[in-house]
Amino acid sequence: MGQAAVEFQQVTKNYGSGNVLENFNLVIPKEKIVTIIGPSGCGKTTLLKMINRLIEPEAGSVLLGQQDIGELNPVELRRSIGYVIQQIGLFPHMTVEQNISIVPRLKGEKKEHLVARTAELLQLIGLEPEQYRGRYPHELSGGQQQRIGVARALAANPSIILMDEPFSALDPISRVQLQKELIKLNEQVRKTIVFVTHDIDEALKIADVVVLLKAGQVIQQGSPKELLERPAHEFVREFLGQERFPLAYSI
């Protein structure tokens, strides 16, 4: 599996109506796209929000590299992690350049570096810097806004990017395009991307590693190929859909 970027050790989380996670363990490998899938309420978003301390566990530890994130300053921690959500959350009164450079700016980086970094990131996501840096979010399509969201998440050069249903509000064509671009992008920038999605096709298409959860437990973790060729449990077949396992019925 390689080195761990994030590790959950014996984590328990309770929202008052029973444990969402109980003695939960998971290793998220470095520099991979890891998709987290499972039925509603299985703990997907809880896991994601624990990594940047938007949610705190009742027990156990979440390690970033070798460090327990409970010992880190939450603001500094969040500034060191990219975060892309469905409702993009671009600031409407700020230009594309100001939106992309907001975290490095808060960290006190120099103006000339911010300008150069914005240009580099716009090139990386396939938008012409001179054409787009001065625009405002309302002047962009949904797909372009989501690209800016990805560029903003990359701006402070984090090792980890969290993505919570980032493409689910887009039309099917933009969505497929962004999925392809994310795969290509991570071949260049080599980040650890933790990607929560309800879309099984999306999860299987973009993932290096898939984590399938049910009721706060990992049912199976592996490459898309491993889940499809060697499902560890009947639930894997049920959740991914029997039609994805034609070989099982033709033997």
Image: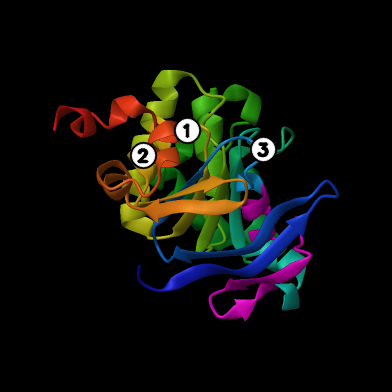
Q: Position of residue 169 (x, y in %)?
A: 57, 25
Identity of the residue drawn at 40% across and 74% down: 3
Q: Is residue 45 left or right of residue 205?
A: right
Three-letter residue code for mark 3? Leu
Q: Position of residue 190 (x, y in %)?
A: 38, 60
- What residue would you read off at disc 1? 131
Q: CA distance from mark 2 to mark 1?
A: 34 Å
Can residue 178 be seen here? The reply is no
Q: Of residues 240 and 209, which is closer to you in this image?
A: 240
Identity of the residue drawn at 35% across and 71% down: 2
Q: Position of residue 129 (x, y in %)?
A: 46, 41
Q: CA distance from mark 3 to mark 2?
A: 28 Å
Q: Of residues 59 and 236, which is closer to you in this image?
A: 236
- What residue would you read off at disc 2? 204
Residue mark closest to the camera, 3 vs 1: 3
Query: What range is drawn magenta here?
Result: 46-69
Do the CB atoms of the residues marked 3 and 2 lie less than 8 Å apart? no
Quarter occupied by residue 97: top right
Quarter occupied by residue 103: bottom right
For residue 90, the mark is 3
Identity of the residue drawn at 42% across and 66% down: 30
Q: Is residue 189 above or below residue 151?
A: below
Q: Residues within 10 Å of mark 2 (few under 14, many from 20)?
A: some
Mark 3: secondary structure: loop
Q: Is residue 186 left or right of residue 5?
A: left
Choose the circle earlier in sequence order: 2 or 1. 1
Can residue 130 be seen here? The reply is yes
Choose the circle earlier in sequence order: 3 or 1. 3
* Colour mode of the rendering: rainbow
Q: Is residue 114 left or right of residue 68?
A: left
